Image: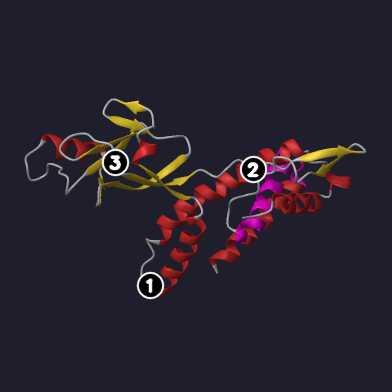
Amino acid sequence: MVSIDTVYQRVLALANKEQRGYITPQEFNLFANQAQTEIFEQYFYDVDKARRIQGNDTVYADIDDMLEEKLQVFENTDKAAIISAWTASGSGRILPDYAYRIHLIYKGSYCCEILNTKDFEAAINNGPLLKPSTQRPIANIRNNVMLVNTGSYTTPSSVTYFKKPTTVNWTYVVINKKAMYNPNASTVDFELHSSEESELVYKILKFAGVSMKREDIMKAGAGMEIAQIQQEKQ
């Protein structure tokens, strides 16, 4: 968890509002959510890249463990009662907006094999050797619709997924024409791992520079972001 007020104050300090321009709370919240989304989505690309590393298993394990730790906060499981309330679409269920990426699908005590559409249809329509069963359930996700088959279409017992980050919000009150942090309102902090604080600051600063058409701020944010990424890769 990263304090949104801490990030806000750091962004303002780096932007040096007296000389370079002012970032309004509304703009900050917009940039903050964009930055959080970018960092969150990058996790999945980094996981895939880490698992392609050849050779040093220790290095791979360290990177993979670190990424798994960062993703764990977003991992949730919905059981059958909740899944049954998802909107039906033909023989399947429409994935809810909060589910970003499906991780595991279970029917009973058996984990479903998640297949692409071609293999899923082939398994259902071809001979008995490929046909799904209660011991070999299969699943498919297409057009945001989840299908599960055990010989017939069914509702899974549980679905484990990575949820989308909650929309962050820096709340404030205006005192003497100045926006002051109000933690008693509907403040929402970043859900990201605490190690992402600096990258959040640099990304938001970069977005602010683009918005204000201030190349110096944009370059400062982009430069610090690149330095942060290079440091993490060492």
Say left or right for 233 vs 101. Answer: right
Q: Quadrant of the N terminus?
A: bottom right
Query: Percent position (x, y) of residue 229?
Result: 59, 60
Residue 29 has which mark? Answer: none
**Pair 2/3: label in front:** 3
- Main secondary structure found in the magenta portion: helix
> Residue flagged by tag 2: what amino acid is it?
Val
Query: Is 29 one of the magenta-colored residues?
Result: no
SS under mark 3: loop
Q: Which residue is depicted at the point 48% across and 44% down?
A: 163
As displayed, is residue 60 above or below residue 28?
A: below
SS under mark 1: helix
Query: Percent position (x, y) of residue 203?
Result: 65, 49
**Pair 1/2: label in front:** 2
Query: How far apart are the alpha carbons under marks 1 and 3?
Result: 35 Å
Say left or right for 70 vs 227. Answer: left
> Magenta part of the protein: which range?
194-216
Query: How far apart are the alpha carbons under marks 1 and 2?
Result: 37 Å
Query: Is 211 one of the magenta-colored residues?
Result: yes
Query: Percent position (x, y) of residue 219?
Result: 71, 50
Q: Which residue is depicted at the point 55% across and 69% down?
A: 234
Residue at the extreme front? 81
Mark 1 or 3 closer to N-term? 1
Residue 168 has which mark? Answer: 2
Tell me the residue that label 3 is attached to.
Answer: 156
- The foreground one among 116 and 156 is 156
Query: How far apart are the alpha carbons under marks 2 and 3?
Result: 32 Å
Tell me the residue that label 1 is attached to.
Answer: 57
Mark 2 or 3 closer to N-term? 3
